[in-house]
């Protein structure tokens, strides 16, 4: 549980500071993957509808192209705060209804 709390702390810090994050994780039935992402949200997924909390990212360097990425906390091996910041205006193209409150101006 401590690992998940530490991961969530790093993730929330990235949201609040608008910093990109490096996530290393183990997808189901695949090798370990590392991606550079925008931290979007933390909580249950509308897509999976199972009520389980997940880290929600926007994957910037997937070989399949940029896309949303939701990862269960138990799949995360490491989260690393990067020095590079991002502008939410470059990534948010909808009216957000975040689970985790943040100060992203009109993208909050």
Image: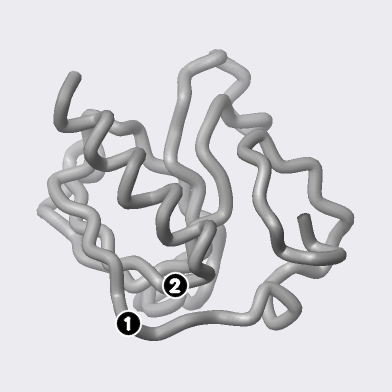
Quick one: label 1, few (<14), some, or many (20+) residues within 10 Å? few
Asked which quadrant contains residue 62, the reply is bottom left
Helix, strand or loop at label 1? It is strand
Q: How many marks?
A: 2
Which residue is nearer to you in this view: 37 or 48? Answer: 37
- Where is residue 96 shown, x and y percent of the image? 80, 51
- Where is residue 44 shown, x and y percent of the image? 56, 25
Q: Residue at horizontal 18%, vertical 39%? A: 29
The N terminus: image quadrant: top left
Quick one: label 2, few (<14), some, or many (20+) residues within 10 Å? many
- Where is residue 77 shown, x and y percent of the image? 14, 46
Helix, strand or loop at label 2? It is strand
Q: Is residue 108 left or right of residue 22?
A: right
Residue behind mark 1:
83
Label 2 or label 1, whichever comes before in sequence order: 2
Q: Residue at horizontal 33%, vertical 42%? A: 9
- Where is residue 63 shown, x and y percent of the image? 35, 77
Asked which quadrant contains residue 68, the reply is bottom right
Which of the labelled discs sits on residue 19, or is there none?
2
Q: Residue at horizontal 62%, vertical 19%? A: 49
């Amino acid at each position: 549980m401590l690992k998940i709390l530490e991961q969530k702390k790093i993730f929330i810090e990235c949201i609040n500071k608008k910093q990109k994050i490096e996530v290393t994780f183990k997808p189901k039935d695949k090798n370990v993957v590392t991606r550079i992402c925008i931290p979007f949200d933390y909580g249950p997924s509308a897509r999976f509808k199972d009520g389980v909390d997940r880290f929600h990212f926007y994957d910037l360097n997937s070989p399949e192209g940029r896309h949303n990425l939701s990862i269960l906390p138990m799949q995360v091996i490491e989260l690393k705060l990067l020095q590079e910041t991002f502008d939410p205006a470059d990534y948010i193209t909808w009216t957000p209804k975040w689970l985790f409150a943040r100060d992203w101006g009109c993208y909050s």
